[in-house]
Amino acid sequence: MGENGVFAAIVAGDTFKYYSEGEWRVSSSGKSVPIINPTTRKTQFEVQACTQEEVNKPIAECLVKEIAKPAKDAATEIVRSGDLVAYCAEEGVRILGEGKFLMSDSFPGNERTKYCLTSKIPLGVVLAIPPFNYPVNLAVSKIAPALIAGNSLVLKPPTQGAVSALHMVHCFHLAGFPKGVISCVTGKGSEIGDFLTMHPIVNCISFTGGDTGIAISKKVSMIPLQMELGGKDACIILEDADLELAASNIVKGGFSYSGQRCTAVKVVLVMESVADILVKKVNEKVGKLTVGPPENDCDITPVVTESSANFIEGLVMDAKKKGATFCQEYKREGNLIWPLLLDNVKQDMRIAWEEPFGPVLPIIRISNVEEGIHHCNASNFGLQGCIFTKDINKAMLISDAMETGTVQINSAPARGPDHFPFQGLKDSGIGSQGVTNSINMMTKIKSTVINLPTPSYTMG
Ligand SMILES: NC(=O)C1=CN([C@@H]2O[C@H](COP(=O)(O)OP(=O)(O)OC[C@H]3O[C@@H](n4cnc5c(N)ncnc54)[C@H](OP(=O)(O)O)[C@@H]3O)[C@@H](O)[C@H]2O)C=CC1
Ligand SMILES: O=C(O)[C@H](O)COP(=O)(O)O
């Protein structure tokens, strides 16, 4: 079985290596897969039995390098994307296999002369535009429902994240997707965006990102839009809350991927009577966050661009000038900003309203819950929110009063699991995502009506 000369590098002992990042490698699984010669029915070759981690790593490493996502989170994004595709394939079969049969005499005044058959048909071409923070997962969450519903798809990946997305597209290519079903065009959104979004062959746009989505909505013609835009997710803490649980969720919700998630906790509204204890607990946890390069799997990594870092710094300096309490010293090196909790934030500070998309979290102290609800509802955003209390009755009342697409009770905001509906009110979006909603949104209803000359029940 041995290979000689130029091919020696691709074999380890009797087993062929696998190829990743320009190198021939041996799997950490220590296992191999036999390839049986159909003629002799004996093992002819052995190849590496790669682990799931090794399969994911080529894409995941791009995420680390391109968007500074911590290594563990990058691998999670890839696994999550694979799971989403698998679930979508099943859900598509369920949803698209369904139709409806309606009879005219079930509506007042009609006879049984019409049989209506309805089914779902594809829209045509779906344009998918994901943002930098989930260039793979938020691409797949658009690609999978579009394809299972029978559409073809054009992906315009975020510039920062494009290489990760290209690797993901290659997986679809390797899986044998027919030519032309998926296209992936790269380039700056500011340069090719209008051409794509206003292109006459595009029948639907699924977009995730910032205010750009609002501009697109105003420009495009009469096609279905799915827009997931910014958020200023509020976290309301009542007096009876489990403060340890709340503190853990505030840190996880506010600082994971350095706050660069639309669903990040972006303002904490805490009852004054428990504010000191909560702030102490949150500070202890913030102190344990590691700061540094994504390759080292640090919790806080450089934010995506220098202009993002400058924007975040602008919010911090505005809060400083207007008297916010700094729980940590503000520290920045290049794009790396150390996690910062700002206490006693007031309504006139920009950070009370704007989303930093960075590791900086404001705390507003409130004297009653209505104040918290009012702050949440006064925002132009309405993505998610969360409430911490042990009183489920109160939580339900507050949830109903909050003008956000989702309210989490006793947990930080989050999009997943990916089959849950995900939607924003007001400037946070149009339509609803989640596997089922996306499949439905990317199809049209088609009816065929059979007309009988005489009512069917008159015979016999
Ligand atoms: N609701 C949600 O799920 C999310 C919301 N966000 C929001 O987005 C903000 C910033 O994220 P970011 O990714 O920079 O958002 P952007 O809106 O700037 O970019 C999102 C996507 O749109 C593309 N794009 C840019 N200009 C145009 C255009 N004129 N026409 C069509 N496409 C265009 C970008 O491409 P290119 O990279 O080439 O510019 C990118 O692929 C955050 O502050 C947050 O508010 C972000 C992530 C998720
Ligand atoms: O774009 C985003 O930031 C997301 O849609 C949030 O997803 P997550 O809650 O799973 O991080």
Image: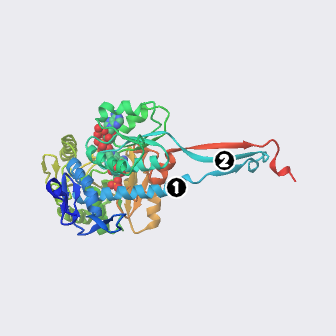
Does 22 sit left or right of 182 as displayed? left
Decide if ligand 2 comes within 8 Å of the CB at mark 1: no
Residue 353 visible from this viewpoint: no
Say which of 367 and 268 sits in front.
268
Residue 164 against residue 394 in the figure, above or below: above
Relative vertical location of residue 401 with respect to residue 223 in this rendering, above or below: below
Q: Which quarter of the image is occupied by the N terminus?
A: bottom left
Locate residue 109, reporting x and y percent.
Answer: 79, 45
Q: CA distance from mark 2 to mark 1?
A: 18 Å
Q: Quadrant of residue 248?
A: bottom left
Quadrant where the C terminus is found in the figure: bottom right
| Mark 2 vs 1: CB contact within 8 A | no
Q: Which residue is mark 1?
A: 93
Residue underneath mark 2 = 117
Q: Residues within 10 Å of mark 2 (few under 14, many from 20)?
A: some
Q: Position of residue 371 (x, y in %)?
A: 37, 53
Q: Amino acid at mark 1?
A: Val
Q: Is residue 209 visible?
A: yes
Q: How many marks?
A: 2
Provide residue 111's location: percent of width, then percent of height: 79, 46
Secondary structure type for disc 1: helix
In terms of secondary structure, where does tag 2 sit?
A: strand
The residue closer to the viewer here, 2 or 108, is 2
Residue 274: give x, y in percent of width and height: 29, 65
Q: Name the amino acid type tagged 2.
A: Leu
